């Protein structure tokens, strides 16, 4: 039996030493300042014009998709939407540092990572319109994407679900000898769930090659970060669990890219978890069901709008002579048109047959589910005007 001594690393002190909050003094990596200028002595990650262009386009695409789909929700075309304005650098630039074989486990505001991976506009629309082309067969709310081919695990609504799952998935990757890691995205609010603590501890103890990527955007719906926790953000918790940790400016594309590259290399080579805390701000409302004017000021939003990640990255690209404003405008026009076309296609695709609702769990649907289905069908037959056969349930013709 191995001799174990859990005190072997503990130093003795003969005067009471109180370890105070903030002692760790965790700094935030920033490579571009708010005007897009490289910070003093910063070492920028290797990036060429083509990649910079793809990152910029992915961020613009994400923002345009968000704008259009908020509009579509307001028009009654989809039931719900959740935008990521202000957080595009955090989600896109982190995905850039990954390998296509790495698994992404996301919370719900990481559409930027999915865009960068190549999820198509039509795929976005089919999911949001819950039509029969949606691989989830319309059983989830809009924005609960998932795609096996892109190694993007289907999103779960209950906060924190993906965190222990990511630890387990990464453990499986290690056991199978795969040259791949898992990245797990979550908000600082989700880090208050028990699943965060269980997941991080499990990953640390079992040496799982997993990046825990926390978007600290300052809010969990209406609850500001200072009412959520008293410690030094989420980064301090990584240290507590024995997880290597980096704090990064989440609105700085190059810093997020560099931090995630370092984390990936460490996770893969040392077979260990790494926590990244990306400091950012949710410029959008929490979702289309939320109105932030009730809990934060316009001045606060304006302060953060000045740190916009897209503007900052464009300013840096400009200094490199890489920014082609005309080409970006043309890209944005084309993207707007593509999104609208895909939206119109998706809303005309029929929804799944109602029988699907009791399939895929049991080999043979049990009698009580069959009975409920019969009752549901009778109800639909009685009120057919409320149950149209396409996804566009209550909108007539608006764009
Ligand atoms: C277990 C659970 N509790 C509460 C909710 C309701 N809820 C949905 S999003 C959210 C806020 C999460 O905030 P954060 O993790 O910081 O992510 P952000 O929305 O800021 O991106 C809450 C409380 C939920 N989905 N699941
Ligand atoms: Mg948050």
Image (cartoon, rainbow, N blue to C red):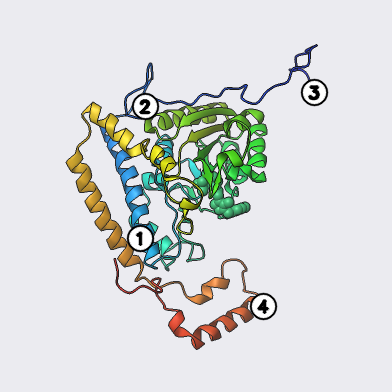
Dividing the picture into quadrants, the one containing residue 74 is: bottom left
Q: Residue 71 carries which label?
A: 1
If you read the primary sequence from the N terminus, does the residue marked by circle 3 or circle 4 appear first? Answer: 3
Which element carries disc 2, helix, strand or loop?
loop
Which element carries disc 4, helix, strand or loop?
helix
Q: Does residue 168 appear anywhere in the picture?
A: no
Q: Where is residue 397 in the image (x, y as percent from the top left)?
A: 29, 72
If you read the primary sequence from the N terminus, does the residue marked by circle 3 or circle 2 appear first? Answer: 3
Dividing the picture into quadrants, the one containing residue 391 is: bottom left
Q: Mark 3 points at which residue?
A: 4
Dividing the picture into quadrants, the one containing residue 340 is: bottom left
Q: Residue furthest left?
A: 326
If you read the primary sequence from the N terminus, does the residue marked by circle 2 or circle 1 appear first? Answer: 2
Q: How far apart are marks 4 and 2 (CA)?
A: 61 Å
Count of numbered badges drawn on the protein: 4
Callouts 4 and 1 close, C-beta under 8 Å: no
Which element carries disc 1, helix, strand or loop?
helix
The front one of 217 and 137 is: 217
């Amino acid at each position: 039996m191995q001799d174990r001594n859990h005190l072997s690393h503990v130093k003795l002190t003969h005067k009471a030493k109180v370890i105070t909050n903030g002692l760790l003094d965790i700094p935030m990596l920033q490579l571009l300042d708010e005007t897009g200028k490289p910070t003093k002595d910063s070492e920028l990650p290797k990036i060429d014009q083509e990649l910079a262009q793809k990152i910029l386009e992915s961020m613009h695409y994400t923002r345009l998709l968000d704008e259009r789909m908020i509009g579509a929700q307001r028009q009654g075309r989809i039931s719900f939407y959740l935008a990521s304005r202000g957080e595009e650098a955090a989600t896109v630039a982190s995905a850039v540092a990954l390998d296509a074989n790495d698994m992404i486990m996301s919370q719900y505001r990481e559409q930027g990572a999915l865009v960068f991976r190549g999820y198509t506009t039509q795929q976005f629309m089919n999911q949001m319109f819950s039509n029969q082309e949606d691989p989830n067969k319309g059983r989830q709310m809009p924005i609960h994407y998932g795609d096996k081919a892109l190694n993007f695990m289907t999103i779960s609504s209950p906060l924190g679900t993906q965190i222990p799952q990511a630890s387990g998935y990464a453990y499986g990757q290690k056991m199978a000898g795969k040259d791949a890691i898992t990245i797990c995205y979550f908000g600082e609010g989700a880090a208050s769930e028990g699943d965060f603590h269980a997941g991080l501890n499990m990953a640390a103890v079992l040496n799982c090659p997993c990046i825990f990527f926390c978007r600290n955007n300052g809010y969990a719906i209406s609850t500001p970060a200072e009412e959520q926790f008293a410690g030094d953000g989420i980064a301090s918790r990584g240290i507590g669990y024995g997880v290597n940790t980096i704090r990064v400016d989440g609105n700085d594309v190059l810093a997020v890219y560099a931090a995630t590259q370092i984390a990936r290399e460490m996770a893969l080579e040392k077979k260990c978890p790494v926590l990244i805390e990306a400091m950012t701000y949710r410029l959008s409302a929490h979702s289309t069901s939320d109105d932030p004017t009730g809990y934060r000021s316009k001045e606060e939003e304006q302060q953060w709008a000045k740190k916009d990640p897209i503007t900052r990255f464009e300013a840096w690209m400009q200094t490199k002579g890489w920014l082609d404003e005309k080409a970006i405008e043309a890209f944005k026009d084309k993207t707007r048109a593509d999104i609208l076309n895909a939206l119109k296609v998706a809303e005309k695709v029929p929804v799944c047959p109602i029988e699907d609702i009791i399939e895929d769990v049991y080999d043979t649907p049990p009698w009580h589910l069959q009975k409920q289905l019969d009752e549901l069908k009778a109800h639909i037959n009685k009120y057919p005007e409320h149950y149209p056969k396409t996804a566009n349930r209550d909108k007539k013709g608006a764009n």
